Image (cartoon, rainbow, N blue to C red):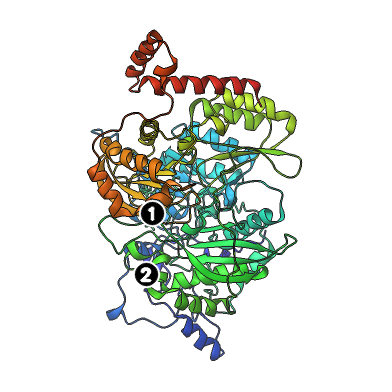
Amino acid sequence: MSASFGAANTAVFTDPKLQFQGSHGLRPSASAHQLRRGSGLPPCSSNTSVVSAISTPVKPDTSSAPKRSKVEIFKEQSNFLRYPLNEELQTEAPNINEAATQLIKFHGSYQQANRDDRGPGGKSYQFMLRTKNPCGRVPNKLYLVMDDLADEFGIGTLRLTTRQTFQLHGILKKDLKTVMGTIIRSMGSTLGACGDLNRNVLAPAAPFVRKDYLFAQETADNIASLLTPQSGAYYDLWVDGEKIMSAEPPEVVDARNDNSHGTNFPNSPEPIYGTQFLPRKFKIAVTVPGDNSVDILTNDIGVVVVSDSDGDPHGFNIYVGGGMGRTHRIDSTFPRLSEPLGYVPKEDILYAVKAIVVTQRENGRRDDRKYSRMKYLISEWGIEKFRSVVEQYYGKKFEPFHELPEWEFKSYLGWHEQGNGAMFCGLHVDNGRIGGTMKQALRQIIEQYNLNVRLTPNQNIILCDIRRSWRRPITMALAQAGLLHPRYVDPLNITAMACPALPLCPLAITEAERGIPAILKRIRAVFEKVGLNYKESVVIRVTGCPNGCARPYMAELGLVGDGPNSFQIWLGGTPNQTTLAKCFMNKVKVHDLEKILEPLFYNWKRKRQRGESFGEFTTRMGIEKLQEIVEKWEGPVKATSQFSLKLFADKETYEAMDELAKHQNKNAHQLALEVIRNFVAAQENGKAE
Ligand code: SRM
Ligand code: SF4
């Protein structure tokens, strides 16, 4: 085990006055490091024998010390994420105090309360746990353990997230240590799943045995290790100091410890993060050219493997500055796509990533968390200045970005060859919520066949390492639990995503996960009404607030909660997730959605160019023109579907169907189509292809 625990420095300090010196918001600029290098002094050298994670030995002039957010003070006084969390966890209360609530995020948990359940007894406190699974990789044993924990300690469901992890909701404070300990002992982790540090590192979930995919996944693992907290607080709190960690590759340890360009806090238990960690959450994705299963441009750092003509990886293109979160009515907050920074040879990637992280650590805003993400730093500085500062920490110049092919969204649903004789099967899970019969069936299959799984950045799951002879029985078992081949899932559902929102997300303004099933059915009905083909689709993403957890600003149709039962409508993302949508309308009540969507889809059907997606169409038309179309719309169009039940059913059948359909709030034609589709699906599944 080569993980560097600052053994002498992991004692739990309970008196905040005994805490370490903080940076007081003063940060050395890269040029200060350059000066120190020039003067022969070790960069960021510590002049004290106590543990020090201050980035400069110079005492600040407190009269002009920059303002810092409360979370900065909590971090500084926490003894590397311990105080007062450890103390708060020992109390009988069902909840923890404000400082501990901030700190427990770094350990992978959020304190929540059920907003549907505001009984006379006050808030019903509970905790959400989020795992860390670089590349979405989940070993067989860990899946089974998560499945058990959800039933025994949670709300009975597993939630797959938009960053390839699991969330368990509804854990009580008294059970936290048991649940955390069980995950850690099953070779899982929640360390750094939340908080102001690097979050789960994305990479394509497909278990292809191909040089570039394997290299992307290995790189994601290495970056995740490089940026994992080192102080040992996590293990102290949850497994009484047991150091249950997998061994790190030597190149990760070397990159972490290297301080030749003034990146590190020498002698600190957290050589990269120091006492203050990062100004805000930080997100990284790695992929291969053309594979945009990871929404690469929405990350703080996007890394793309570049290979030679024989398919051997030789380096990486790096993008920087993506992010989705914004605040309603504050235009200085915005979603942003990342932009090219440059190319690095493969042996330099960890050093380049570290240099970018350190640039954000030193320069990202720590006064107002609304503006602390790296995208705001890059927007303010411009990419040239950002690059030149990063280069000082990297110690080299970035080479020019290599040309890349078009991005394509890949879902990996259905059956595929892995490339080593085995197969994998990608399953669509509506909004990542695994519960009920589906949960039982998945567990049974994963246990019986001893399968490893992967989670995708689109809240789906991939069953891996399947022998050919297992394909038929597995298909049958999946179909019985309603886990159909993607061919039989409504194409609108296949690419749709919604965030959890109500009742547990404290930031939710309106419904998302609970509201999306009805919204998708209504959009399907609009499609049929305006004559759009069943196979045509639009990427729809819904969130309960503007933070953008389901990345709605990349969708062709994004619905962003902006009031009770009301949404902002965003238009203009593309199916391959490369264009930022624009805000089209505010405060659209959910029951009024058809009034807006019907004219939009009707015009797309009529006026689109060959092969033009809905997102491309709305961008070509422009927001103003589309607003005019919606304003002038004169009520619903007549059904223009080429086929009408009336044409091929006798009068009695039609009337009976019509009567049945009314009970389901549909028309006869819609119901007939549904019956036919279900029949065909059942036949096909019976064949268990
Ligand atoms: Fe998120 C906060 C759920 C991916 C941007 N996000 C939250 C919290 C923890 C609410 C809170 O702070 O108390 C939500 C918990 C809800 C619950 O009950 O489960 C939450 N975020 C999620 C998940 C579960 C959504 C999902 O449907 O899967 C995703 C978990 C990812 C993971 O496994 O790590 C999730 N969140 C994202 C993404 C998408 C991504 O990372 O690719 C984004 C937009 C990308 C980005 O970060 O820019 C995102 N979440 C936010 C933000 C806004 C950040 C910002 O820059 O302003 C917040 C609020 C905050 O940080 O202050 C937030
Ligand atoms: Fe909560 Fe908003 Fe994220 Fe949805 S987008 S989970 S409502 S923070």
> Measured from the top left, where is residue 557 in percent x and y?
38, 46
Front residue of 89 and 404: 404
Q: Amino acid at mark 1?
A: Thr
| Residue receiving disc 2 | 365
Of the 4 image quadrants, the one containing the C terminus is top right
> Measured from the top left, where is residue 142 in percent x and y?
60, 40
The tag on residue 87 is none
Of the 4 image quadrants, the one containing the N terminus is bottom right
Q: Taking 69 as reference, is 530 above or below it?
A: above
Which numbered disc flags the more N-terminal residue, 2 or 1?
2
The residue lying at 45 percent from left, 47 percent from top is 613
Left or right: residue 291 compared with residue 581: right
Q: Residues within 10 Å of mark 1 (few under 14, many from 20)?
A: some
Is disc 2's CB within 8 Å of ligand 1?
no
Q: Secondary structure at mark 1?
A: helix
Front residue of 676 and 397: 676
Q: Quadrant of residue 379?
A: bottom left
Left or right: residue 376 compared with residue 610: left
Q: Amino acid at mark 2?
A: Arg
Q: Residues within 10 Å of mark 2 (few under 14, many from 20)?
A: many
Q: Secondary structure at mark 2?
A: loop
| Residue receiving disc 1 | 619
The residue lying at 45 percent from left, 53 percent from top is 194
The residue lying at 74 percent from left, 32 percent from top is 468
Foreground tag (2 vs 1): 1
Q: Taking 634 as reference, is 65 above or below it?
A: below
- Going by the picture, which residue comes out furthest to the top? 652
Q: Alpha-carbon distance for marks 2 and 1?
A: 33 Å
Q: Answer yes or no: is residue 94 visible.
A: no
> Measured from the top left, where is residue 385 in percent x and y?
45, 78
